[in-house]
Amino acid sequence: MSLGRFASDALQAIGLGNVAKPENLRARKLSPQHSAAAATLQTFTFDLPTDRLIHSILISIGESTTASGETEQGTLANDLTDIKVDSNMGPLKEMTAGMCQAIMKMNQDNPSTGFYKLYFTDAALKTRPLPSWIFSSLQLKVTGNAPAASNYHHVRVSVVESEVPSGLNLADWRILVERYIRNKRYGTSTGWQTYDHEKAYKVLGYLYAMDDNATLSATIFDRLTVLGIKPEGEFRITDEQWINHIIELNTEIYMVALGTGYFYMEFPDALDTAQFSRGSLISKLNVPTAGTDAGLRVLERFLK
């Protein structure tokens, strides 16, 4: 139940080194859930506990011909398609399952088949755990594809948490929110295509997921420009950078490939997107050769 390779230093930096020592962390097991019917796509909803600091959420999914059972997991498989953490204050996590596993790789937690991990304490970003008690409603929703004929899905969830330290001050607390807001489709268009970003938060990074006709692709786009426009002028964060070079840099930094079709743009000092509220903040990606239906989703990782 590691918090990640750099967890100790990160937690010291945010003043929680004593809270999140391994002996102070525990994994709380939630009641497992099973498919209501065989060979059927289903969304599973788990009520999350709201009495401690939540550092991460671990999910596993498997399938078997057994319909249910407390200990049934079946054969583990990468069968999740979408993952969401909803609250009464809005979504905290909203991502594809592939995005989740790419982030695991960025945290040196290279995922095994069928495992997914959501981070609030992200060691690489030095973000803080989730103070769950501030929410009146907190739910994890995971969607699995349809398992094989006669098979049922079995989903297990554990919440990695710690006790609330005495006198904890939440005055300047910020929560790591990760969500993509659209699945942009460009059809068979070639040339430069535009993707609009939110303009309200301090963004820590953008995780891009490129596809052609819903199949992840590393070549459907070849260049990236990230451009902010405000009344005072134009601000280019990156200008016509080769995407395969960004992918290679990601592999060098994280020591593992993020997966076909994924690449990450990090903003170490956090990009204050509110400065573009009177203009625009866009990613422009070039389609060199027409595909069947070029598509793009961007997971925006920001503090809220």
Image: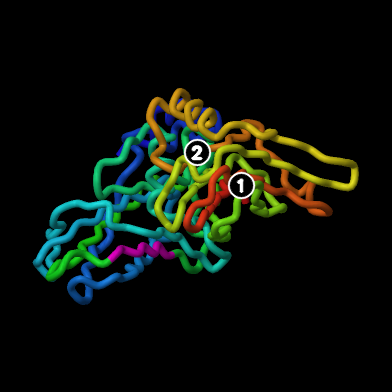
- Structural distance between the alpha carbons of marks 1 and 2: 20 Å
**Could you classify mark 2 by the number of other residues whose Cα lies within 10 Å: few (under 14), some (14-19), or many (20 or more)?**
many
Please, which residue is most extreme toward the bottom here?
37
Q: Is residue 148 above or below residue 56?
A: below
User: Where's residue 146, x and y in %?
Assistant: 26, 67
Mark 2 residue element: strand
Q: In the picture shown, does residue 186 fall above or below 224?
A: below
Give me the disc on residue 303: 1
Instruction: In the rendered structure, find residue 263 and report the number of the disc placed on it.
Output: 2
Residue at image location 35% in from the left, 64% down from the top:
143
Q: In this view, does 279 lie to the left or right of 39?
A: right
37 part of magenta stretch: no
Residue 121: give x, y in percent of width and height.
Answer: 47, 41
Residue type at mark 1 is Leu
Indicate left or right for 266 with 27 as reference. right
Is disc 1 surrounded by few (<14), some (14 to 19) or many (20+) residues within 10 Å?
some
Residue 68, x across and y down, in percent: 14, 69
Residue reaching furthest front?
Answer: 289
Residue 30, by quadrant, is: bottom left
> Which residue reaches farthest right?
232
Q: Is residue 166 left or right of residue 3?
A: right
Q: Give the range drawn in magenta.
A: 139-145
SS of the residue at dot 1?
Answer: strand
Quadrant position of residue 147:
bottom left
Q: Is the magenta stretch mostly helix, strand or loop?
A: strand
Task: Using the rendered view, name the quadrant where residue 96 is placed.
Answer: bottom left
Image height of 186 relative to 223, above or below:
below
